[in-house]
Amino acid sequence: MKKIIFLITSIFLISFIFLTSSLPAWAVTDGSPCDTIDLGQTADCPYPDGGKGCCMCEPRDGNLYWSRFKNTPCSAAPGEPEESEIYNPALNGFGTGEGETIIAQVIANALKIVFSISGLVLLVMLLIGGFQWMTAGGNKEALANAQKRISSALIGFIIFISVFAIINFVAPVLGLEFLQILKIEWPTP
């Protein structure tokens, strides 16, 4: 029975991980928001009927949005691949600036990386604890270990959220502008 439960759980997890939607999550569309790093950049943006145009990231109403400015793709010449830059949001502005701004960027980027890693550790601990709970099979010691792992993960999550909230509330009061870049950026379709 344990093997069957393990097999069903494994198939479910594999299908959940690998059979997710393949829709482009970061597609550039006319009117969608863009980041400051994209300001002035161009990118191909699709038409609803399937064609492609060229969009540019520009300010509008106090925010940055992609706007279509020509009805043909942005490609420099037919057959040539477009040049693009790889952008890592966790290391925003890495290697730029002078003096205290470099130190501020390093601290802010280190905190972003630590927050990302701690979120992944939380997810893994919850998955392992849940799997241990499902496969405990009436063994009280295994069930207690699973409950301990899940409660430890949730306590760690509460500490993680508390640190994030304290940094975001205290930084503006103390004038630590470099920590104010620690904001949650949700991907937009």
Image (cartoon, grey):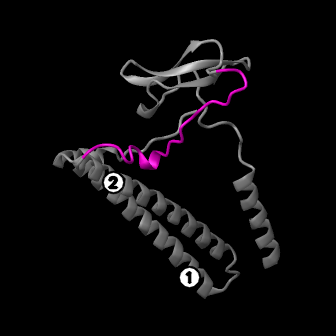
Which circle marks residue 81 in the picture?
none
Q: Please tell me how crowded label 2 is: few (under 14), some (14-19), or many (20+) other residues with Cα within 10 Å.
A: some
Q: From the viewer's perspective, tell me whether residue 85 is left or right of residue 91.
A: right
Give the overall secondary structure of the magenta segment: loop
Label 2, on which residue?
A: 106
Q: Please tell me how crowded label 1 is: few (under 14), some (14-19), or many (20+) other residues with Cα within 10 Å.
A: some
Q: Which residues are magenta?
A: 77-98
Gap in angstroms between the C-alphas marked 1 and 2 = 41 Å
Which circle marks residue 144 in the picture?
1
Residue drawn 47% across and 57% down? 116
Residue 85: image x %, image y %? 53, 38
Q: Image quadrant of residue 183?
A: top left
Between residues 176 and 102, which one lies in front from this camera angle?
102
Amino acid type, residue under disc 2 in the picture: Val
Residue drawn 37% across and 57% down? 110
Q: Image quadrant of residue 112?
A: bottom left
